[in-house]
Amino acid sequence: MYSIVGILALIILFITNRDFFFCWTAPSPVGMERQPDGSNLPDESDLESAQQAQTQTQLTQTQRLYRAFLFGVFGFYLTDILWGFFDAHGLVGFQFVDTSLYFFAMSVALLFWTSYVVSYLKTSSRLGILLLVFGNIFFALELVAIVANIFLPILFWFDDDGNYQAGLARHASFVIQSLMFLCLSFHVLHVAYGSKNATQRHYLAIGLFGITMVIFIAAQIVYPQLPLYAMGYMIGTCLIHSFVVEDEKEVYRDELEKALERERGHMQDLMDGRKALKEALDVAQNASRAKTAFLSNMSHEIRTPMNAIIGLNSIALEEPTASDAVKEHLSKIKISAHHLLDLINDILDMTRIESGSMEIKNEDFSLASCLVYVNNIIESQCKEKGLDYECSTKGDVDGWYRGDAVKLKQVLINILGNSVKFTPAGGSIRLTVEEKSRFNGQVTLAFVTSDTGIGISEEFLPHIFDAFSKEDVSMTSKYGSTGLGMAITKSIVDRMSGQIEVKSKRGEGTSFTVTITFAESSDDKSNNAESGEQDAVQQVAIAKAEDGRKGLVANSGDGRTEGLADLKGRHVLLAEDMEVNAEIVVMLLRRHDVEVDVARNGKLAVQMFTEHPAGYYDAILMDMRMPEMDGLEATKCIRSSGRSDAALIPIVALTANAFDEDVKRSLQAGLNAHLSKPIEPDVLFNMLGTLIYAAESAGKK
C-alpha cells in the first residue's frame, strides 16, 4: 500500500512540478551581451536569443523555497516507497532506518513550507516571524528525537514480530505539525481577507493546503498503518500547482512576453539608430571628401592667377626701362599680392586643421637642414628690415630625428615671421634649440624664440592663439596681419603632441617656447666636413658676413654650397598648359640664360622627351593639371621609358596643387620635388641647381 501510493504521488509530483525540479539555474529572460567594441548595439542573434529566453524560467527567492519544499516532499515519498519494499521482505533493520528518514523528510518539508508561506505573503508580521522561529525549533527537536530514538524508543519501534509500534513522541510530533499547518493557514487566510482577485485566490489555495494537511495528519494518527500523510501531500501539492503555480507561470509568461516585446522594440530602435549613425557617418565622410576636393580646387584656381600676378610683377620690377615711380607701384603690388597669398594660405590651412585632414608625418629628417631652411628665409627678411638675427644650439643636439620636418619649419617660420613683422628696425631676433630630455628612444627639444619687438599686452595674451584675434585692428593695415598665424601654429603644435608657451611685455618684446618630442632617428646619418663624426647641427656655424649680417651656413662634404649651381646653358623642358604661366617661367629662366622648350600637355612632354637624345634635357618642370595627360601620368611614362637618363633626370612639380596629399602623390609618381605656385624665382633657381648637380654627380658614379 505504502509503495503504491508513494510511487503514484511521486509521479504526480514530477509531472506537475517538473519546471521547479529541473530549473537549476536562473538565467535572465532577456539580455544583450556587450559587443567587442564596447557598444550595446544588437544584431539578429540578439533577437533570436531573446526569443529563446521566453521559455526559460527565472526563480525568485520564494520560488526557490517552494522548490526546496518539493524536494522535502520528494524525500518523504521515497521513504514511503522503500517502506513497502522493506516491509514485504521483512527487513526490519532497513525499516528502522527508513522510518527515521521518514520523520527527517517530514520535518524538512514542514520547515521549508513555513519559510515559503511567510516569504510568499511578503509581510513582516509578528505571527509570520514567530512561525519561522517555531518551524526551526521543531526541526531541531525532531532531529534530537530521531537521534534519541536510536537509543530509547520514543518515536517508534518494532516489536519481536517486526510490527511497527508508534511512540508518544510520534503523536506529539504529529500534533505539533498539525498546529503549525493550522497556524500557517490561519495566517494566510487572515492576509487573504484583505486581498483581491488572483492574489486572494492564491492565498485561499495555500490556506486550504494547510487545512488539508491537518485533516490527513489527524487521520494518520488514528490509522498509523495507512499512508495518509503522503496522500495529504499529494492532494495539497496538486492544489497548490493548479491554483498558485500555474497562475503565476501564466502571469510570468505574460510579463515575459511584454518584456520581450519591449526588448525587441529597444533592439529595433538601437538597430535603427546604428543604421542612422552609419548613414550620418557616410554623409559626413562624403562631405569631408567634398570639402577636401573643394579646397584643393579653390587652392588651384586661386593660385593660378596669383602666379601670373606675382610672376609678372617680379619680371616688371626687373625691367630696366621702368621708372622709379613705376617700380614703387610695383613694389606695393608685390606686398599686397603676397599678403593676399598669405591670407589664402592661412584660411586653407585653418580649414584643413578644423576638418581634421591635416596629416602629421613620422619620418627621418635633418634638424640642420630645417634650421638652414628657416634661417635663410628669416635672415633675408631681417636684412631687408635692418634687424639682427641669430640662431644657436644649446647643449648636445642630434643631427637627425624622426617626425614631421615640414610642420616644424612651418611653426618656426610663423613665429619668427611674426617677430620680424612686429620688431622695429634696429631690433634683434634670437632662435635657440635645446634638448630638454631623452628617455626610451624619445627626445624632447625646446625651440625658444625671442625678440625686442612691440610686445603684447597682458590682457591680450590669453587670446593670442584664437583665430582672427588681433590686439589692435589697425595691425591689418600697418603690419598686414591676418590673425590666423598663431592659431594655425598652436593647432600644429597640438597635433604634434607638443606645447607652446608665450611670455611678453608691452614695449619690451616677446618670447615663445615650443616644446616637441621627437623619436630618435633609426639611422646614423650625421656627417662632418672634416672627420664625419660630428652631428649635423654642429656643422652649422654662426659667422659674421662681410655685410655685417649674421648668417647660418651649412657645409657639405665637398665644400659646395647647396643651390648655387650654374644654370647658364642648361636645357629645361616645361610642361604647362596655361599660356601666361608658361610665359612667366620662360621669361624667368631665360634671364639666367636657360634654354626652355614648352609642351602644352603631359602627352607632348613625354613625346618631346623621348624624341630627343639622352641628356638633351637637364631638367623637367611639370605642371600637374593638364589636358590629355596629367603631370603624374606623364612622369610615370618618362620614368618607365627605359632611356639611360629616364631615372636620373630631375622632374619638379610646378603646380597650384599645394596640399600635403598633392606633394605625396607627386613624390610617389617619381617627381624629385614639389614647388607650389606662385613661383618664387630664387627658390626655383636654387631647386634646379641643386637637383641638376645631384643628378650629374649620381650619373658619374
Image: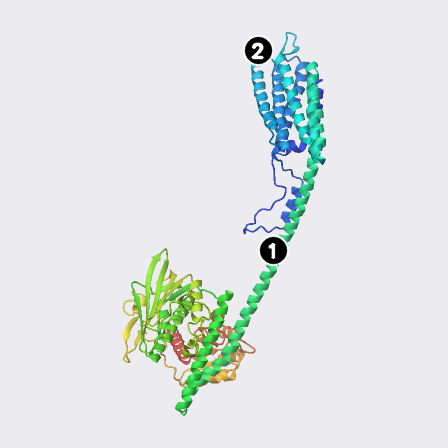
Q: CA distance from mark 1 to mark 2?
A: 76 Å
At 39% from the left and 82% from the top, the residue drawn is 567
Q: Secondary structure at mark 1?
A: helix
Q: Position of residue 175 (x, y in %)?
A: 65, 17
> Which residue is disc 1 drawn over?
274
Residue 499 occupies quadrant: bottom left
Task: In the rendered view, tell whether residue 359 sits above or below residue 232.
Answer: below
Q: Position of residue 413 (x, y in %)?
A: 39, 71
Choose between 233 and 627: the one closer to the eye. Answer: 233
Residue 317 occupies quadrant: bottom left
Task: In the rendered view, tell whether residue 588 sits above or below residue 252.
Answer: below
Q: Amino acid at mark 2?
A: Leu
**Residue 10 visible, this orientation:** no
> Which residue is disc 2 drawn over?
152
Q: Position of residue 523 (x, y in %)?
A: 37, 62
Q: Secondary structure at mark 2?
A: loop
The quadrant of the image that shows the N terminus is top right
- Return the residue found at the far top: 160
- Of the two numbered discs 1 and 2 on the same chain, state the one appearing first in sequence: 2
Q: Label 1: few (<14), some or many (≥20) within 10 Å? A: some
Mark nearest the camera among 1 and 2 is 2
Would residue 529 appear left or right of 65 to someone viewing this image? left
The quadrant of the image that shows the C terminus is bottom left
**Residue 204 visible, this orientation:** yes
Task: In the rendered view, tell whether residue 431 sits above or below residue 159.
Answer: below
